Amino acid sequence: MIATSKFVFLHLHKSGGTFINEFLRRFFPAAKSIGYHYPASALPREYADLPRFGLVRNPWSFYVSWFHFQKQKPRPDPIFRLTAGDPANFADTVRRVLTLGEDRQLLGQVRALLPADLIPSPSASLELSRSAREAIGPNLTKGSLDALEASEARSVGYYTYLFQWMYGDLHHTTIARLASVGPEFVQFLDAVGERVTDDMRAYLRANVPINRSSHGHFADYYDDDLAGLVAEKDAHVVDTYRFAL
């Protein structure tokens, strides 16, 4: 997360947050970086009452991006390694990660590989064990899986779980869809009293993709059954933000 004097940006994994991070570093040099993919629950008390901004991505697009991003890493994070086969197959991997909350044995294996505490930053991870360094992606902890293990949450998809872990009860939080991040972020900045300069508007209009993994259009990766499973498991995000395949 990144905090300015007037708002906080919460960075949800693989949802376009690097673009906003770069914007804030460029135009808000006094902004303070607080941890790496830290959730709202870890927000320091002095920033607790500030407005918050976050992004949400089409879940069907998220799984394609997440799969290819992890697949190309020399050492993927524990959740990918434990849900992907050898060789990794998109449909099978996504089906397993979508139903992760229903598999107590697999959850136990994931928990064993996650760190006990949030990792402050990628550089700080150099002092940690290899398994802890591998978990730096979404920065999940052993305790973060408690929500996924709760009986009422077992039907929740992986992206919805990450969304709820990051944003919590959405207190003071404005969520923008990744596809319209430029104009929605300008509206947010106006609302919190920040002066939006022409240079800022130009940067946001450009919307340069950052950390984009190499893959085709996300819709091409789904058959009807897998597409329906995403719609079922990530219904909260799909319905709330009106996403479609």
Image (cartoon, helix red, strand yellow):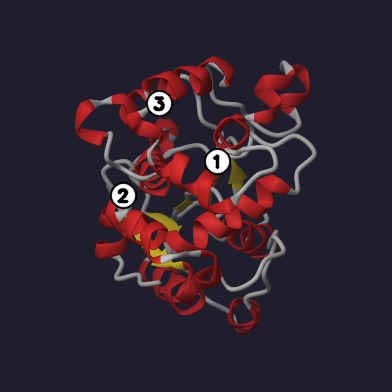
The label number, if any, that marks residue 37 in the structure image: 1
* Residue found 44% across the figure and 31% down from its top: 42
Q: Is residue 124 left or right of residue 47?
A: right
Report, in whole angstroms, how far the alpha carbon at label 1 lies from the one at label 3.
16 Å
193 relative to 42, above or below: below
Residue 39 in view of the camera: yes
Q: Which of the two residues, 62 or 98, is positioned nearer the viewer here?
A: 98
The image shows residue 77 at horizontal and vertical percentages of 64, 34
Foreground label between 1 and 3: 3
Q: Residues within 10 Å of mark 2 (few under 14, many from 20)?
A: many
Which residue matches tag 2? 233
- Mark 1 or mark 3: name the one nearer the start of the chain: 1
The image shows residue 222 at horizontal and vertical percentages of 48, 64
Give the total number of marks visible in the rendering: 3
- Mark 3 or mark 2: name the one nearer the start of the chain: 3
Q: Is residue 200 left or right of residue 4?
A: right
- Mark 2 or mark 1: name the one nearer the start of the chain: 1
* Residue 244 lies in quadrant: bottom left
Report, in whole angstroms, how far the alpha carbon at label 2 lies from the one at label 1.
23 Å
Q: Which of the two residues, 141 or 41, is positioned nearer the viewer here?
A: 141
Q: Are marks 1 and 3 in contact (CB under 8 Å)?
A: no
* Residue found 39% across the figure and 62% down from its top: 227
* Residue 204 lies in quadrant: bottom right
The amino acid type, in three-letter code, at marker 1 is His
The amino acid type, in three-letter code, at marker 3 is Leu
The label number, if any, that marks residue 145 in the structure image: 3
